[in-house]
Image (tube, rainbow, N blue to C red):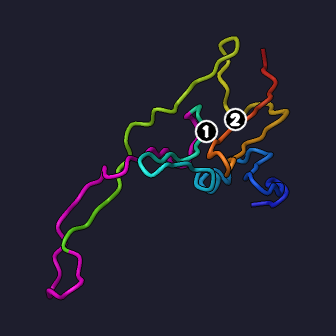
Amino acid sequence: MPTYRFPVDPWRLVETEYSAEDLGKTETIFAVGNGYLGMRANPEEGREAHSHGTYLNGFHETWSIRHAEDAYGFAKTGQTIVNVPDAKLMKLYVDDEPLLLATADIIEYERSLDFRTGVLTRDILWRTPA
């Protein structure tokens, strides 16, 4: 990922340009959680996303693990974290034109995660075809 897209800020992680190629990485580094609920930072429009993800602490699948030999410290149960329904999806239309980041004429873009407050914000200014 080019570093010019992430200017240095002492208390915020800032991204100044959208890139569909790096979406999997930026969804991860801008993810937020509070110990009970965690959300990947995929675009709220819900169309292009590397991996939608909303997770609840303690919500997982379990299965038995069988080993050829039993020994102290071997896990007997496996766990997999499971996605819950993604409640942060939002579709934005202007004159029946949807906002699609991959094809939008973006004039200004900034996404930031404030480490003091834990708030993720995204500001976009784009020109519509209409």
Q: Residue at x 47, y 46 (%)?
A: 53
Q: Position of residue 3 (x, y in %)?
A: 81, 61
What is the residue that sits farthest to the front in this orientation? Answer: 116
Mark 1: amino acid: Pro
Q: Is residue 36 found left or right of 126 in the rendered image?
A: left
Q: Which mark is residue 5?
A: none
- In depth, the one of 37 and 123 nearer the eye is 37
Q: Is residue 99 magenta?
A: no
Q: Position of residue 83 (x, y in %)?
A: 38, 46
- In depth, the one of 52 and 20 nearer the eye is 52
Mark 2: amino acid: Leu
Specify the segment rendered in magenta: 46-75
On the rendered image, what quadrant is the N terminus found in? bottom right
Q: Is residue 55 magenta?
A: yes
- In depth, the one of 104 and 89 nearer the eye is 89
112 in relation to 76, above or below: above
Q: Is residue 46 found left or right of 77 in the rendered image?
A: right
Residue beneath disc 1:
43
Q: Residues within 10 Å of mark 1 (few under 14, many from 20)?
A: some
Q: Residue at x 21, y 68 (%)?
A: 77
Q: Position of residue 11 (x, y in %)?
A: 75, 54
Q: Which mark is residue 101?
A: 2
Q: Report which quarter residue 48 is drawn in.
A: top right
38 in relation to 46, above or below: below
Q: Residue at x 70, y 37 (%)?
A: 122
Q: Report which quarter residue 49 is drawn in.
A: top right
Q: Secondary structure at mark 1?
A: loop
Q: CA distance from mark 1 to mark 2?
A: 8 Å
